[in-house]
Amino acid sequence: MAKEIFTDEQVEMEIARLRQTEEVKLAEKVQRIKYKRRLYMSNLRYLEKVGAKLIADGFTLDNIEEKMFGEVLSEES
């Protein structure tokens, strides 16, 4: 069975048709959601590594301002 050969114009027409279908719109939305979740997971993994290094360096939630700035900043600032 031979492959069908499309002209450039036919390719553009088929792309335009496919972009309008509900199936493609739905699949693209799923793809975007999955990509965002994977990116978020990647960011969280990076932050986990940074946090582990901070903990190893003696940082805690209670002393972070003092460690970073040498003083505790007031809540009003």
Image: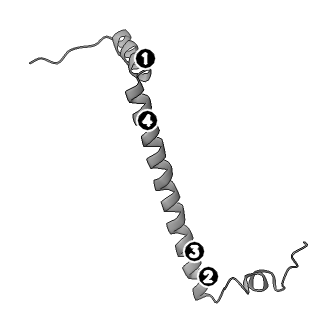
In percent of width and height, residue 61 lies at 69, 82
What residue sits right under mark 2 in the picture?
54
Of the 4 image quadrants, the one containing the C terminus is: bottom right
Earlier sequence position, callout 2 versus callout 1: 1
What residue is disc 3 on? 50
In the image, which disc is placed on residue 55? none
Asked if the residue under mark 2 is in contact with the one under mark 3, i.e. CB atoms within 8 Å, the reply is: yes
N-terminal label among 4 and 3: 4
Quick check: marks 1 and 3 in contact, CB under 8 Å?
Answer: no
- Closer to the chain start, of discs 4 and 1, is 1
Report the amino acid beneath label 4. Glu
Quadrant location of residue 74?
A: bottom right
Disc 2 marks which amino acid? Leu
Which comes before the other along the chain, label 1 or label 3? 1
CA–CA distance between discs 4 and 1?
A: 15 Å
Marks 1 and 3 sit apart, C-alpha to C-alpha, by 45 Å
Residue 36's place in the image compared with 56, above or below, is above
Choose mark 2 or mark 1, whichever is in front: 1
Extreme residue toward the right, this view: 76
Residue type for callout 1: Ala
Residue 12 falls in image quadrant: top left
**Figure check: 7 above or below 62:** above
Percent x, y for residue 71? 84, 85
> In percent of the image, x 46 and y 48: which residue is there?
35
Mark 4 = which residue? Answer: 28
Residue receiving disc 1: 16
Label 2: state its secondary structure.
helix
